[in-house]
Amino acid sequence: MTQALTVRCKLIVPINFKQKVDETLVGFADACNQILAVAKRDNCWNTTKLHHKVYKPTKESTGLKANHVCQAIRRVINQKKATKQIHKFRPTSISLDARTFKYIEDKQQVGITLKEKRVNFDLKIGGYQIALLRNQTPTSATLSKNRQGDYYINIVVEVPTQPRNKTPKVLGVDVGLRDIASTSTGKSWDGKQLRETRAKFARVRASIQSKRTKSSKRLRRQRLSGRERRFQKWVNHNISKQLVEEAKNFGVIAFEDLTGIRQRAKVRKSQRREHNSWAFYQLRLLTEYKANVAGIDLILVDPRYTSKTCNCCKVIGNRNGKNFSCVNKLCGWVGDADHNGAKNIAGVAGVVVNQPESSTMFCSLEETVLGLKPPL
Ligand SMILES: [Zn+2]
């Protein structure tokens, strides 16, 4: 089994080549727009038929290479399939195939066919990207330029996935404000560093906002939020790596489904700023794709009751800040609240673990443990 992954790599484009890359981007967008006009006029959305109509005139008028024109035709047709309504194409990206790009592993470069000629560019990538690209001969990629004027290449690779564990156990993961993640095995990742960085950025933002110059405000705010975002992603990247490493002893990893957490959770005003459901979602996504490569399934659990219920006797207990204490005198479990939550998440997920229909499933403590509905 393999899984297609997109590896996003920053491309180092020397200043004297920027114009050549931009020319190619503009040419590709022009080609797409010309092809789109013909396709609309003749109501023709078949690749072969459209190719006959547009190939020659498009190649002549744009001066692009043959394979760029072929990719432009594909882009138009795929866009039509994906969105029905097609807007105008803008010169922000170009589709590449085996003839127009090559990954050169020993130099960490990519060769890209531009409008004028073939050029090799250095990649600015880290260990994770290098590992995904190892021994790969990718045949599909997209070259793009963002608003800041940076160039990226998104390379599609097929990564082998490990065979699934036949008798899996579940590692439960509780995400929170104080600790970013806590597992049912009792491990946790402190959010202190992330909170402090966020608070610092928020203070700087507040002082910038108090100044009146509009342009400097916008500029600096963008830069800060970018740094903040990158720091958060770096933190989540590290945690997800360790979570998946831990989950290798289990076979399944379970998260709460926090869609809509912002509406449900009650947080103090000072915490609200930190309470970023996107950060949790990102942690889940990063974990999910690393887990998939490692042959580990990811299950989503309904978050209701997971923090209120005692993991031991399933009675609703008291959560007091960092601590949980069970009110059931026969049980009396006392411990870390996040650890309790993670154990509940693992427990709920464990119920459905042996019916893996898909990699992402959904189940609920309400339905299984509290017995409000019959267990699956
Ligand atoms: Zn209990």
Image: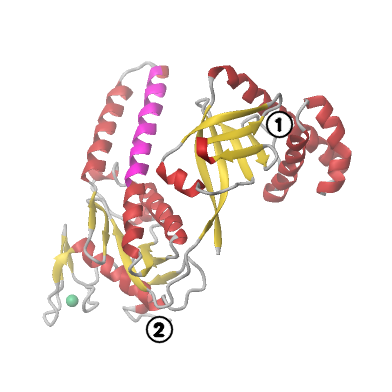
Say which quarter of the image contains residue 101: top right
- Disc 2 versus disc 1: distance between alpha carbons? 57 Å
Of residues 252 and 337, the one nearer the viewer is 252
Q: Is residue 307 visible?
A: no
* Mark nearer the N terminus (2 vs 1): 1
Horizontal side of 140 relative to 125 (left or right) equals: right
- Work out which quarter of the rendered image holds the N terminus and state it: bottom right
The verdict on residue 203 being magenta is: no
In the image, which residues are magenta? 216-235
Vertical placement of residue 345 versus 76, above or below: below
Say which quarter of the image contains residue 16: top right
Instruction: Identify the secondary structure beneath mark 1.
Output: helix
- Work out which quarter of the rendered image holds the C terminus and state it: bottom left
Horizontal side of 272 relative to 258 (left or right) equals: left
The verdict on residue 231 being magenta is: yes
Q: Which residue is mark 1?
A: 28
Residue type, mark 2 in image: Pro
Vertical placement of residue 215 versus 146, above or below: above
Residue 47 percent across, percent down from the top left = 81, 47
How dense is the environment of label 1, judged by Cα within 10 Å: few (below 14), some, or many (20 and up)? many
Name the residue rendered at 26%, 36% in the picture. 197
Name the residue rendered at 84%, 42% in the picture. 51
Horizontal side of 77 relative to 287 (left or right) equals: right
